[in-house]
Amino acid sequence: MKSRLNRRTFLQGTGVALGLPWLEGMAETTPGPSPVRMAMLYMPNGVNVGAWVPEGKGRDFRLSPTLAPLERVKDKVVVVSNLWNEASKSGDGHYVKEAAILTCTTIKKTPGADLANGVSVDQVAARKSGQETPLASLELGVTPVAIGVDAVVGYTRVYGSHIAWSTPTTPLAREINPRSVYERLFRAASEPQGNAARMDSLLLDRVLGDAKRLRAQVGTADRLRIDEYLSVMRGLEERVERSGDTSRKTWKARAPIDGKAAPSDRPGDHQEHVRLMLDMIATAFQTDTTRVATFMFGNAVSNVSFRFLEGVSAGHHDVSHHQNDADKLEQYKLISRWHVEQYAYLLEKLKGMKEGESTVLDNSMVLFASALSDGNKHDPHRLPVVVTGGGGGRIETGQHLVYAEDSPLSNLYVSMLDAFGARVERFADSTGPLPGFLRG
């Protein structure tokens, strides 16, 4: 594909939504009722379980060593213990669990383009709020989509590259280039209604046309890879069409956007890349460009090197297979804590954005979770899950909720959808909302 699709066009074509690094000089939000936002942050490879679980329960709890970076927002935190995703209990160690973290569905085992999963909870929320903002949702990451088949388990790697699904067969393309995200945000907020969507549609048509022409010139294996790419692009086509719908009510940004403040498209290191993308979420929420976002710290089976952390000498996936080695367990803890520090970075940024008497964090709910607990066992039980933010006053924050063993993860999603204003009777295998999570 490199011969026909240059990197810049490819990144723009796979760009899904936008954001803009938060600028301290931005004005406070405009008057009016504050919208509720939902963000879902995914970390691959599980955690060092022994360093994750807080001491105590209810409001009388102490954050664990891994969760200690959340101390300054502890009153906005809900740590949720003993949830699991039953639909992911079978299959391989990673893809079945990680592709389904937001769908709670058993994915189809396939090496090719005939994907099958479920609709993710973020997209259920986006259907409720998507007509009220320029962008229905924002999907971000830092790692390119992986293609081909993982020969060890027989699943296409595309499953491990997406957590947001608009339909059971349509994973949503993620944006990984900060500048491209910024440019699209600015267009959506600045162009007359419909113009930005037409520009995106023309670009998408060009990229898809190149891909389809290339498909006719390559062998079977490469055609399969292009088919995987095209299956992801179907989700982008759907959203471009939806963003061009001029029937939605007139939208106004809740804060100004500086068109000259484009971020780098070449972050200096992994941490800078992560923080730039988290800045995108913060600004998208603060300006009300979108109310729904997902972020992947890495693809399934991510082996990003964390040698930049003192005391860490290996990649993430390698360390997660600790085999109870004390040194690897310590490195595993340090890597998990680093991810929580980035989560805290976003939360504190949202807390600093005023909305009348409240903050953007008060009017948001930000999930941080992994699809595994112990990566060494590929364990789907007792998932590491935290939700921070008031959800517009609907969430009982500042507590550690401990449920019966193997309570459905989908029950949390039913509760979050209720707080978001997109109430559902059921989601996937849910049995009802989580007791004690919501007020009233």
Image (cartoon, helix red, strand yellow):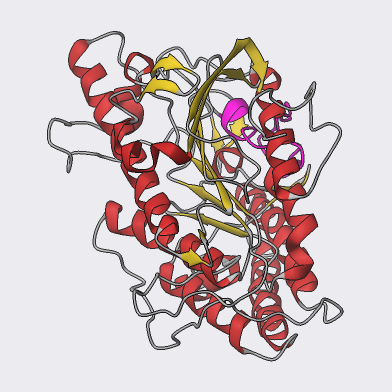
Residue at 73% of width from left, 86% of height from top? 193
As rendered, which of 246 and 177 lies closer to the eye?
246
Residue 25 position, x and y percent, is 35, 80
As rendered, which of 403 and 173 lies closer to the eye?
403
Q: Quadrant of the N terminus?
A: bottom right
Specify the farthest residue to the left. 310
Q: Quadrant of the C terminus?
A: top right
| Residue 4 in sight | no
Residue 354 position, x and y percent, is 47, 65
| Relative vertical location of residue 32 with respect to residue 99 in this rendering, above or below | below
As rendered, which of 3 and 306 lies closer to the eye?
306
As rendered, which of 358 and 307 lies closer to the eye?
358
Main SS type for the magenta part? loop
| Relative vertical location of residue 72 with respect to residue 201 in this rendering, above or below | above
| Residue 135 counted in the magenta span | no
| Residue 261 in sight | yes
Residue at 29% of width from left, 52% of height from top? 270
Specify the farthest residue to the front. 357
Specify the farthest residue to the bottom. 192
| Residue 106 counted in the magenta span | yes
| Relative vertical location of residue 202 with respect to residue 120 in this rendering, above or below | below
- Identify the magenta region: 95-119
Which image quarter: residue 205?
Answer: bottom right
Residue 368 position, x and y percent, is 49, 38
| Relative vertical location of residue 300 with respect to residue 294 in this rendering, above or below | above
As drawn, is 125 to the left or to the right of 182?
right
Residue at 50% of width from left, 20% of height from top? 58
Residue 120 position, x and y percent, is 71, 42
